[in-house]
Amino acid sequence: MSDSNKILNTVKDSPIIHVAPSPHIRDIKTHTQRMMIDVLIALTPVVIVSVYLFRMYAVKQLLICIVTCLAAEILFVRMRGRSLTIKDCSAGVTGIILALSLPGSAPWFVGVIASVIAMGIGKIIFGGLGMNIFNPAMVGRAFVMIAFAGLMGAGSYENITGLVDAVSGATPLSALKFNNTPAIFTHLFWGNTNGSIGETSAFACLLGGLFLVFRKTASWQIPFSILLTVLFIAGITDLAAAASGMLIVHHMFGGALMFSAFFIATDPVTSPLTSKGKWIFGCGTGILIMIIRLFSGYPEGVMFAILIMNALTPLINRWTNPQPMGEA
Amino acid sequence: MGLFKLKGFPGTGNFRHGIHPPDNKHLSNESKVEVMETPETVTLPLLQHLGVPCKQIVEARQLVSYGEMIGKGEAFVSASLHAPIAGIIKKNVMVTLPNGRHLPAISIQASGDQIAPQRLWDEMRSKEWPRDCISIYDPFTIVKLIHSSGVVGLGGAAFPTHVKVTPNDTRMIDTLMINGCECEPYLTCDYRLMIEAPRAIVAGALLTARAVSAREIVICVEDNKPEAVKKLKEATEQTVIKIAVLKTKYPQGSEKQLIKSVIGLEIPLGGLPSDVGVAMSNVGTMATVARGLIKESPLTHRVISVSGRGIKHPKNLFVPIGISIADVIDFCGGLTPDAARVVAGGPMMGFSFSDFNTPVTKGTSGITVLTHDEIKSEEETSCIRCGRCVDACPMNLVPTRLALAARYNNPSIASQYHIHACFECGCCSYVCPAKINLVQLIRAGKKLATASQKF
Ligand code: SF4
Ligand code: SF4
């Protein structure tokens, strides 16, 4: 046919034409790997502050957790005979978040065990990234917190020699809870207080967290609703105790709240799908945090609050299943 | 246009969710429609519309003249076919259309005197289209003439137009909506038509509104086409036609989303626009209706856009239906060396194909040629449940759940989460950071769900 000859001439040196189902274009700006890299960038200020404050303690903890998490991921994935998933950086992110949520003084095996549990029980057992119900880093931390209560408890924070004198004392929340000694706002804000190595500086967490929200890598609904709920409940307790704002400042800027609200609760895998679901998740987390902080033996409740809400996420997803358009 | 209210309309000018892909209209939106000369052969599949194929009424070696009916749409949901060129009918052929259908087709070898296609286009562009004397046509005549001119929706779905406009006592039509959104990236054929032949669109709209006895006529255009809005405003002066300028967003031009944007009503699941008193048609279809009724010339030619970075000279063309895509691509200077995918329609919902002998059909709104860089396929990773697909789905579905149900062969979950409400717009696949081919999975899931309902 003359037609086909003609086209062969023009198309001859062009490459193979591919056929595939629609849509034929994809958003090049979104990518799982890119999201993980965003998280790594957002964690940088937190890491810098923690290294500045806790020096070798922080460096040691970070190295141990990152290396173990990566090694555990490779090992477990090999065991399951799956292709390597290191490229998505999620193991590295888990490692860093885990390290930042440990006390600087925790001995090396705590970090190692926490990492192995995080990757193994927290993630791989469920089927890898995307299938897990609980935030892996929080699973690892909860395990060591219960298994090594002595090494992880309030005492572990007190025998550190860091750059700033303040970091050798009790954490602000336990000081407040057990000794009733409040910390100064600027210390809480910039971070020269004691605590898990990544949680002390509200400023660094806000900086990184806002970057994540701005990049739309993390949802804004979750951190916003957590902070709002905590602010509300802390406000009531503050008024009731006539503490003129001191309690608000402590609950908002002390402890792991900022760090967790932006970096842990926003983990997409373990939080709800819809916007409405995210609000419920955030408010629930905020309420649980304050219940644990105010009424339990623990000074801090962020970790358990998030784990509980993780468990409720499938349920929240079911409650908030959107109605298709036209289904009145 | 207000933030929450579209001035003069009950809707907001917007719908929930959707995406903003780069529209890439600049490649061809300034090129005037060029008229292609009559090709040596045309190939006309007997089914170019949704519905029943038409019946071939000519024989091999028979001579046909321009506009002669060669296929008769006997069933109600069918459309007739007319010869776009004068010539000799060749032996029957089979063609495979980009949507995967393998069909018998009539092939015509040009011979004898041809009408000048330029004349047809000039007719379309002229300012002479009547706006007031349409009352001489009575509604049933209009429907009959639309039927006999073989008009189908030119926006892509190619549903026979006479079916939509046949008066129906149980479903009254209030509003005739003319869709000029053209929300697919790259395509510019409707845009050029609105600029160059607004009068024909207006005449067609008035006629169609008369057939369905609609009280309101609204032409809907996205706000990235101010030039088209201007031209339509001029053309609709002193008529009842209103123009709705809507937010530019994909898929604004989809039936359900557009009705929601303009009228604020939602079509019930599984329903039709007529359920909410709306008839909708594309701007190109309206111009064809006007041509069929007033000039008594059937649907034989249409405007298509040939665009994309993989084509040397993107253009908008006035072509006879049935012309081979090879001819069209040649006319536009051929493909560039990095061309990688040829799509009939736009990149979001179009069908890709590799056989360049494929003909342009009534529903082909354009040819989009994408390059390697644009279609680079990335490895699919696991769903991270980020919810972006949920926030993108204009039907408010949960694409990730539908895709999972399809992947794990679970038709009951798929139906429970309304898999059939998905109209495969592609928004979910577009945004997914894990690069999961959600639409493809959902398509498979629909088949599964339908099959399991049968037992
Ligand atoms: S956009 Fe992709 S990764 Fe995100 S929830 Fe949907 S399917 Fe999963
Ligand atoms: S293709 Fe279907 S599921 Fe995906 S966004 Fe469009 S309507 Fe929703």
Image: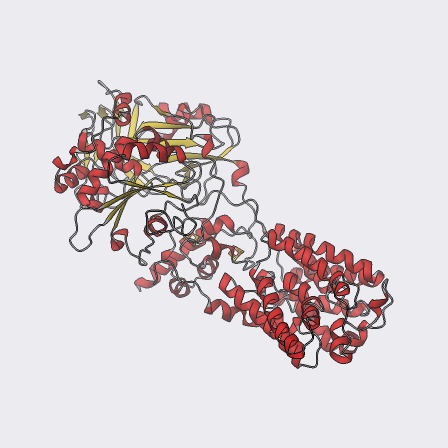
Up-down relation of residue A299 to residue B411 (above or below): below
Q: Nearer the viewer, residue A146 or A251?
A: A251
Say whether residue B355 is visible.
no
Q: Is residue A109 left or right of B149 when viewed as pictured?
A: right
Up-down relation of residue B308 to residue A226 (above or below): above
Q: How many marks?
A: 0
* Residue at far top of view: B113
Which residue is drawn at the image coordinates 64% and 68% (left, top)? A122
Which residue is drawn at the image coordinates 73% and 78% (left, top)? A177
Which residue is drawn at the image coordinates 71% and 59% (left, top)? A203
Q: Nearer the viewer, residue B399 or A309?
A: A309
Q: Nearer the viewer, residue B49 or B245?
A: B245
Residue B284 position in % (x across, y down):
30, 36
Residue B365 position in % (x across, y down):
35, 36
Where, by quadrant of the figure, is residue B301 drawn?
A: top left
Quadrant of image for the N terminus of chain B: top left
Residue A267 position in % (x across, y down):
61, 61
Q: Is residue B375 left or right of B122 when viewed as pictured?
A: right
What is the image's colouring? secondary structure
Quadrant of image for the C terminus of chain B: bottom left
Where, by quadrant of the figure, is residue A200 drawn?
A: bottom right
Q: Nearer the viewer, residue A288 or A24?
A: A288
Up-down relation of residue A149 to residue B430 (above or below): below
Residue B50 position in % (x across, y down):
27, 45
